[in-house]
Structures are given as C-alpha cells and as structure tokens.
Image: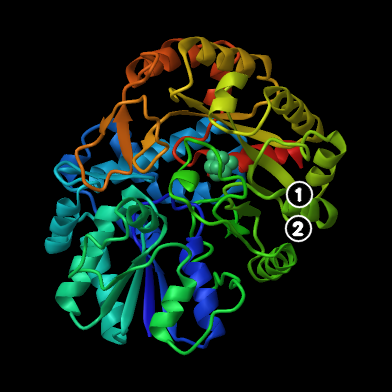
Amino acid sequence: MIILIYPPVAKPCEPPAGIARLSGMLGRFGIEHRLVDSNLEGLLHLLRMPVPPEKREDVWTRRALRNRERNLVSMRDPALYHHIDRYKRAVRDISRVLSIVSPSGTAVGLANYEHRELSPLRSGDLLTAAERPELNPFYSYFKSRIGGLFHEKEPSMTGISINYLSQALSAFSIIGFIRREFPGVKLILGGGLITSWLKNLGGENPFAGLADHLVPGPGEDQLLSLLRPDATGGKIPRPDYHALPTDLYLSPGFVLPYSASQGCYWSRCEFCPEKSEGNAYVPVPTQQVLSDLKTLAEKTSPALIHLLDNAVSPALLDRLSAHGLGVPWYGFARVGQHLADPDFCVALKQTGCVMLKLGIESGDQGVLDALQKGISIETASVVLRNLKKAGIAAYVYLLFGTPPESEASARKTLEFTARHSDCINFLNLAIFNMPACGPHYPEIATRRFYDGDLSLYTDFTHPDGWDRKRVRLFLENEFKRHPAVSPILKNDPPLFTSNHAPFFVMRETT
Ligand code: SF4
C-alpha cells in the first residue's frame, strides 16, 4: 500500500491534480493506495483550533473568530462571488484567524507559510524542519491524521508531492515525523518544486538519507517502476479525485483541475523555467482529453474546469471550440492566430470558456522579440478586443524588469494596458527573476539572489540600470495608480487571484 500526501500550504481552492493523476495510474494497476490532502485538512484544522482569551484582544480578531465557520461556508457559496468587497473581507478574516493561531515565529496564510528562522531555500533548514517536526504549526494535525492512518495500516511507501516553496518546510516536517515514527516506510518526493530542484542541482539528491527517491516530472512511470518493476505504464492516466474531499475546498462548487499537457508547446520564452529547465512537452492526445474531461465531469459535477497547461495548445483549442465541454472552463492560452479570429473566440465562448489567462508580458514589441515571446503586440490588441466581444474574460500577465526592458519600454506597457483597460478584466504584475539555470546573457553579471543553496533564481545587474528597486517604484507610484489601471487591480481576488477570478465573471459572461 502507498499513501500519497499533499502537504500545506497551497491555495485550498481545488484538489491537488498531481496526486489525483497518480491515483488514476495506481487504480488502473489495482495498487492499493490512499490520498491525503494535508493542505486542505491542515488549514481547516488550524482554523478550528481553540484560541485563548489573551489572543482575542482586538475587535477585528474577535469578529474573525466569531465568524470563522460562517466565512468558510460563504467561500463555498456562489453568492459571495457577486460582491468583491464581501469576498475580500471573508478572505481577510480567515487569514486573520490563521495568523492568530500560528505559533510564535511562524506565519501561516491561505497561500503561504513562513518561519522566522527556517527558509525553504536552504537544504540545512529543511533538514532541521525534518529533525524537529514538532516545531511545525500543523504538527498536531499530521501527528494524529497521518499517524492514525499509518497505525491503521502501515504503507510500504509514502509519496509526498511538493509543488510550491510554501509547502517545503511542512513537507519536511511530515517527512521527519514519518522517519521517526515509521522508519521502515520508503519515502518518495515528487512534484513541480522537486523537479525544478533536480534540474537546477544537476540531478543530485540533497536529501539523501531522508528521502529514498526524488522523482522529477509527472512521476507516474517512475512510481510504477518502483512498485511494479515488471509493469509498463502505457497511456497517460486519467486523474481520479474520488478519494479527495471534493466538497470541502474553498470555492463555490467543485473545481476540476486537469493537465492536458506537461511542459509547453512553445517553450522558447527566455525568462521561463520551462525553457531554462529544458522540460519536455508531453501532450495528452486531444481525443483522450475530451473523453477524460467528459468522464470526470460526469463523476464530479464540477462548477468549473481548470485547464492547468502552461499554454493550451492550438490543437486542443480547435477541438474544444468544435466540441465544448458542457462545463465552464478557463486556462492559459497564447496570443496567436486562433484568438485573433473573432468567430473562433465566439465559438470558444459557446463551448464554456469563461476566462483566458494571457501572458502578454510587455507592450513594447522590441522587448517581446528579445524575450522570444513569439507574439505581436498588434495581435495581442486584436485578441483582447475579440475576447471582450465574445464575452470571455481576460486575465493578463505582465512582466517587468527583464534584461531587454528599459523604463521607456515599461511606459509603453502602461500605455498599452491603459488603452486596453476596457478589455482587461484582471491583471497580474510580476517582476522578473533570472532563472538560476539560464538564460545565459554573457554581458550580464549575476550573483546569488537569496541566501540559499536551493534558490531557483539569481540576482543580476540590469544593463540599463532598470533594477528591481526602480521597477518596484514605477509599479507602485505610476503603474498601479494610473486611473485606467487601478480599477482593474482592485478587481483581483486577493490570495486566490486567477483561481477565483472566473467565479466573479461567470455571472456576467454566461
Ligand atoms: S508560453 Fe508561457 S510557458 Fe511557454 S515558454 Fe512562454 S512563458 Fe513559458
């Protein structure tokens, strides 16, 4: 028997797709397994902890504590998503309770976990988290829940799926607990963060002695070869969500996550880890995508489908526009010829597409070309107008401070954004981080960015002096305050951002 665990903290709005896909594979081979979403369960456990009177000092805390169950219920109620201010208040109040119950020196949030002394970017700190699991805010939860499961039936193997830095410290606390209490169990680590670490560290296991195997990439084949050395994987498995508590996630209805591909079909953008890590593009055949989604939708009655692809391929967009899913859906797509066709956008809308996430990055064509983004700013303009006409919301991603960007280019991005503000529903503004394993600009000096051997990024000297500090000032003082931009930013659901954004537009656009 194998137990697959998704550790805290990650946004608890939809089930973890990685362990659900592994579950699909294990089920196909009849391998006994259990799934534990320790993220959702652990956060709900913390939110219900008793709070001593001395911590109930101010009015806000008392209100947040008094309303904690009501706020959790309302996060699952579509009515909350009609009022962004009420929604923001519920999210703030839930976050307040988490901050109150966080032990001293730690800060747990709905999308983050920080420890005053331990950093997930230092392998030594992760080993400390493993040596002293009782320091973790979720310790009482996983001691009873994971300990209970293991006592019921001790698994031969446990897989831990670590995708975000915010999960790493708790994951290692769970690992330390299992190692101490159940030393015979084999431990396998996988997930997006483990994949990136392995690519950046040249495949070496910095946690040897603690984890038996580190598995990069999707993981199905490696896991299968460990469990059934004589079996062959075959087709990409359909995820299986039935073992997860689908009605407890903080969303107004079940959100069905589905990856129709691994990697990115474009994979050329200079700033992107998909390129610098050299991740292979592995699409699920479009026929299988449609049949998987149909079967999963029948089983789970989702309110929304979340396509997790880095960029939904043109081939899949074609199939979707022709067949539809019968359920509202959203995902990342690339600006290109398909979306530049207004009739195609209307067809996509009719198949249930409620929102597309678009990485436009810059309003300066020279920057886009230097980054090998492969899009034209004129086409981006046409696409935004088409989506608006078709009734599909646009969640636009912009990137500032890249090596080819100057202050003048950033102003072009502001001008582009303001000119299209009537077609942009949501905005994500990011400051460029140089991936540690590339791209390699020989003329740019780099240096270690964070104080940590596991950092995936490196600091660099911008050739135009357009450094992070200046970019940040520009964003705060100019970009975010622009009268056409600031209302868009106020639309953004705090913490859950694009995960909850579709629910705010579904009532307008469906
Ligand atoms: S399209 Fe997106 S995922 Fe693909 S390489 Fe560019 S930034 Fe990365």
Determine which of the numbered discs, if any, sits on residue 324 in the image.
none
**In the rendered structure, are the residues bearing label 2 and label 1 in contact, judged by CB atoms less than 8 Å apart?**
yes
State the image coordinates of residue 420 (x, y, percent, origin top left). 68, 19
Q: Quadrant of residue 209?
A: bottom left
Residue shown at 51% from the left, 47% from the top: 75
State the image coordinates of residue 294 (x, y, percent, origin top left). 73, 66
Residue shown at 25% from the left, 69% from the top: 211
Residue 493 visible, this orientation: yes
Left/right placement of residue 271 relative to residue 100 reads right
Assign a secondary structure to mark 2.
loop
Determine which of the numbered discs, if any, sits on residue 325 in the image.
2
**Residue at the right extreme, as displayed:** 343
Left/right placement of residue 448 relative to residue 162 reads left
Left/right placement of residue 269 relative to residue 66 reads right
**Which amino acid type corresponds to the residue marked 1 in the rendered image?**
Gly
Q: Is residue 375 above or below residue 119?
A: above
The residue tagged 1 is 352
Q: How crowded is mark 2: few (under 14 residues within 10 Å), some or many (20 or more)?
A: many
Residue 49 visible, this orientation: no
Q: Any atom of ligand 1 within 8 Å of the CB at mark 2? A: no
Q: Ligand 1 is found in which quarter of the picture?
A: top right
